[in-house]
Image (cartoon, rainbow, N blue to C red):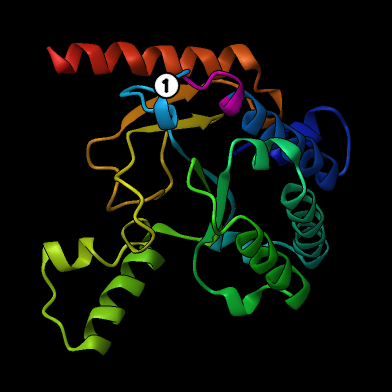
Amino acid sequence: MDGNRRYARQIGERVLVGHAKGAATASKVLEWWLKYLPNTVNYASPVYPKYLTCWAFSSENFERVAEERDGLFAMMTAEFKSLAFTSIVHLFRVRVRFIGGERHRFPQELLDTMDMVEEITSTYDGLFLQIAVGYGGRQELLDAVRSLVAQGKEITEQSIGMETYCAQRGIPPVSLIVRTSERRTSGFFLWDTQAAELHFIDKLWPQLTEIDWLRALRSFSTREIRRGK
């Protein structure tokens, strides 16, 4: 979800206008994800994602200027409240969870809203939406190692793999990363993306279209078929 600020500059608007456009695109992606679900038991498909993670706010974003940062906090609070009562979330039994560290740096209203969304959808098991907030790839690995040390456990490849944000929530390793505007992963899920396919889109996030989404999935399905052979 990258390129909101550049989009705002391109159209001659304030940065927060770009973020608002980006939030609208995120809502559309949720709709597209659910729109093309395979008509199978529990939406099972080797090439269609049952788990979707959106990186909404990185740990580096805490260092943005106060006006932008506080505006993002307010925007996320409003968007997450809306998500809790979005009909398609309940129709498709989407469980929503928030992942990331440094929660103490978020305002209490935003924390309460995230807790509310998780509680409302906690019994759902059809599909799984993760929203990464305050997330950083290096921070995730630091948290994993610190947790192992606190538990007095040996630090091994296997033990670290059990302490990642994905593993703690029963989320399988990442299969596909879709990135807009840049050709890099920026540390996204460093541990759980070893075998992930990468799909880069040369557009800013607010410019993403339904066709772009479908092309990413089609490209991924083709790669999976080739790899299976």
Residue extending farthest front: 41
- Give left or right: position of 167 versus 208: left
- Give left or right: position of 48 versus 157: right
Front residue of this view, candidates 107 and 70: 107
Q: Quadrant of the C terminus?
A: top left
Quarter of image, res 181:
top right
Q: How many marks?
A: 1
Residue in the picture at 66% in, 28% down: 31
In the displayed structure, 127 sits above or below 124; it is above
In the displayed structure, 46 sits above or below 60; it is above
In the displayed structure, 49 sits above or below 60; it is above
- Give left or right: position of 144 versus 200: left
Does residue 173 belong to the magenta stretch?
Answer: no
Does residue 37 belong to the magenta stretch?
Answer: yes
**Percent position (x, y) of residue 176?**
37, 31
**Percent position (x, y) of residue 209?**
66, 18
Q: Quadrant of the N terminus?
A: top right
Q: Which residue is mark 1?
A: 40
Residue in the picture at 35% in, 22% down: 47
Quarter of image, res 43:
top left
For the question of whether residue 131 can be seen, the reply is: no
**Percent position (x, y) of residue 188?**
41, 48
Disc 1 residue crowd, few under 14, some 14–19, many 20+, Cα 10 Å: few
Highlighted range, magenta: 33-38
In the displayed structure, 196 sits above or below 38; it is below
Q: Secondary structure at mark 1?
A: loop
Q: Amino acid at mark 1?
A: Thr
